[in-house]
Image (cartoon, rainbow, N blue to C red):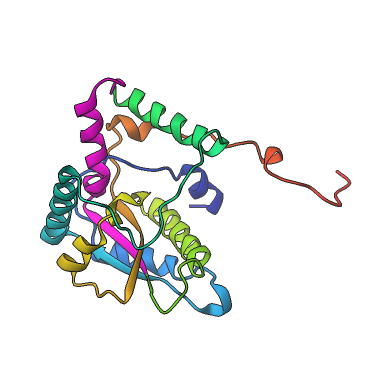
Amino acid sequence: MQVFDAINKRSSIRGFKPDPVPKAVVSEILEAAVRAPSALNSQPWEFLVITGQVLDKIRAANVAKLNSGASMSPDHVAAFWPKESIYRERQVALAKQIFSLMEIPREAREKRNAWQERGFRFFDAPVAIVVMTDRVLTESGPLLDIGMAVENLCLAAVAKGLGTCIEDQGVFYPEVIRDLAGIPETKRLIISIALGYPDWDFSANRLKTPRAPVDKVTTWVGFSK
């Protein structure tokens, strides 16, 4: 698969088949991830790959905490979109698109809550990958490098016929993962990625999000044409 094909084909997958993903395939995808560039080749990323009963226990514990109203204390500050900004408008537009595809009306509180739970269950994917870094590093320092590794991972997954969803809900309760997966406090949990074979019959997977035109977000300097 060509790079541009993978880039254009990649999308956030929110419904997966239950089929297991072989460890060898995940390992090959991670080999692509760690080829990402990093500042002075510092390679500040680490990966926790979870499946099976441990993942099921983490899903259940995340949902239990969510439904109990437990305070979320992620290791890394989640994205924030100021009101009256284009960023907030895009977030709202995305939610409307998803709820429309899933036929969840605004007033259907139970269905909306059930949808929220899916994120804390890693969208029921057979594999969850948690991207971590070491606390000896500053909180923001490794983020650009980690972002490039995550993109490599997602594109490699596409080439292997797999789907991904980069999502922070999976690490909103980091104590759950630390406890059930044996991760020490010395590691900062940055983001999670749901990984598996896409279920193309799942309505939300039909979503293809728009992008602002390149010329709207680019300042060209010194070009004659």
Position of residue 115 in the picture relative to residue 7 (left or right): left
54 in the magenta segment? no
Q: Residue at x 34, y 42 (%)?
A: 13
131 relative position to 21: left or right: right
* Residue 170 image point, x, y percent: 28, 53
Q: State whether residue 127 is above or below residue 219.
A: below
Residue positioned most to the right: 224
Numbered marks: total = 0
131 part of magenta stretch = yes
* Residue at x 51% of width, y 32% of height: 89
Q: Residue 16, how many percent across, how many down?
A: 25, 43
Q: Quadrant of residue 75?
A: bottom left
Quadrant where the C terminus lies?
Answer: top right
When the figure is inspected, residue 125 is found, relative to residue 39, above or below; the finding is above
x and y, in percent, of residue 163 in the image? 35, 48
Q: Position of residue 70 (x, y in %)?
A: 20, 50
Residue 134 is left or right of residue 180, and the answer is right
Q: Left or right of 19: which side holds 187?
A: right
Q: Quadrant of residue 212?
A: top right
Considering depth in this image, is 88 or 101 the residue closer to the camera?
88
Magenta extent: 104-132
Please report the residue visible at 39 percent of the width from the left and 61 percent of the height from the top.
76
Q: Nearer the viewer, residue 2 or 108?
A: 108
